[in-house]
Image: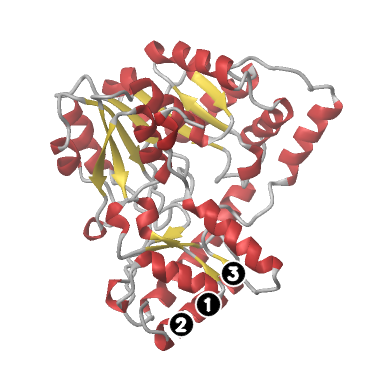
Amino acid sequence: MQTIANFDRIGEENAFAVLARANALAAQGRDIINLGIGQPDFPTPPHIVEAAVKALRDGQHGYTDATGIRPLREAVASDLHRRFQVEVSPDSVLIVPGGKVTMFAAILMFGEPGAEILYPDPGFPIYRSMIEFTGATPVPVPIREDKGFAVSAEETLALITPRTRLLILNSPANPCGGVTPRAEIDRLVAGLAEHPQVAVLSDEIYDQLLYDGEQHVTLLDYPEIRDRLIVLNGWSKTYAMTGWRMGYSIWPDGLYDKARKLAVNAWSCVNAPAQFGALAALTGPQDAVAEMRAAFDTRRKVVVELLNAMPGVSCVVPKGAFYAFPNIRETGWKAKPLASALLEQAGVATIGGPDFGTLGEGYIRVSYANSEENIRRALGRMQAFLAEDEPA
């Protein structure tokens, strides 16, 4: 059966393939430690769960507005003002079923044959997948280890051409854990003044997971680009709500109604009781967020110390998210064969760097969204494997 060519261009997020293989091995009785999937190992805080349960009991069983319930959109705006002192109208907030939806909507709006879209490499694989789906040309923005895996304004601006329609940014970043400093963002925004045709999608899903005194810089803080800025955020990482599929986006006036129409056509509205859970997350106690961040910070230090003690491995200190991106070139292994061997032979799930882009070769992604005990066990296995096994 012949399919439309666009669908043959859709890629994948290989973390889910690794998760499926890890689960299959575990079902066979293997002891598998998963440092692959980007999912907090903490439960959703109880007050959030109770709010969703109460919404069900109270009869919240029907459709909501396609844009999300008004109290939740107001809570998003209030939360952004509380944390960043930025003014956001609830009428620019769109509640969506997970973060990927915002990527899809933004890339679909600007991607077409002949257009170019800039995206980080290494970066979240869905960026490139959706760019290729639209027929646009994906243009990788190098994310380099020697810059702490932060975005380079100079290098990014140099890649913009008259065909560039959209620039995708991600800080704190997946898969590298890099955080782009304010000075670099200042330079980037200043340079974008010369390219008024370029819209910006800022993926800020990890904005509350920073360490070592780093402060998140939201692009909402730059009024000069607000009329072409789309911000992606949500509840999955901050509140351990990955399975709830709760996200939000901020849209400029000229694009909001287009996004609303896409919502009406594609998903009608977001799950009603889940929205009430998300409302409780923003308006209720934030203790669980701080506790989870502190736990990730402790694990981060363990991961970096143990990785740097391994033969042929070096790892810069990640400043955000919950990923380390160690350099494994000196081991003699290519990244994907090493990740596969670690899973099949050592029982440790990681993700090969090339799954995040062509510049990911020579690295693997290690998620520290697992217990410290499991991290120590997993990295002990990895060290033993590297000491004993020759590269494939």
> Which numbered dot is residue 385?
2
Residue situated in front as seen by the camera: 178 or 139: 139
**Residue type indicated by callout 3:** Ile
Write the residue at 39% across / 64% down: 336
Write the residue at 47% across / 40% down: 205
Q: Which residue is denoted by mark 1 in the rendering? A: 345
Write the residue at 47% across / 47% down: 13
Disc with the residue nearer the chain's start (1 vs 2): 1
Q: Is residue 109 at all visible to an observer of this figure?
A: yes
Q: Position of residue 142 (x, y in %)?
A: 23, 48
Decide: few, some or many residues near mark 1? Use Cα within 10 Å; few <14, some 14-19, many ≥20.
few
Q: Position of residue 319 (x, y in %)?
A: 38, 56
> Which numbered dot is residue 325?
none
Classify 298 as above or below 263: below
Describe residue 276's horizontal placement relative to residue 304 as left or right. Answer: right
Classify 341 as above or below 271: below
**Residue type indicated by callout 1:** Gln
Disc with the residue nearer the chain's start (3 vs 1): 3
Describe residue 198's horizontal placement relative to residue 357 as left or right. Answer: left
Residue situated in front as seen by the camera: 226 or 366: 366
**Residue type indicated by callout 2:** Phe
Question: Element type at marker 3?
Answer: strand
**Mark 1 or mark 2, which is nearer to you?**
1
Decide: few, some or many residues near mark 3? Use Cα within 10 Å; few <14, some 14-19, many ≥20.
many
Q: How is the image coloured?
A: secondary structure
**Mark 3 or mark 1, which is nearer to you?**
1
Q: Which residue is denoted by mark 3 in the rendering? A: 33
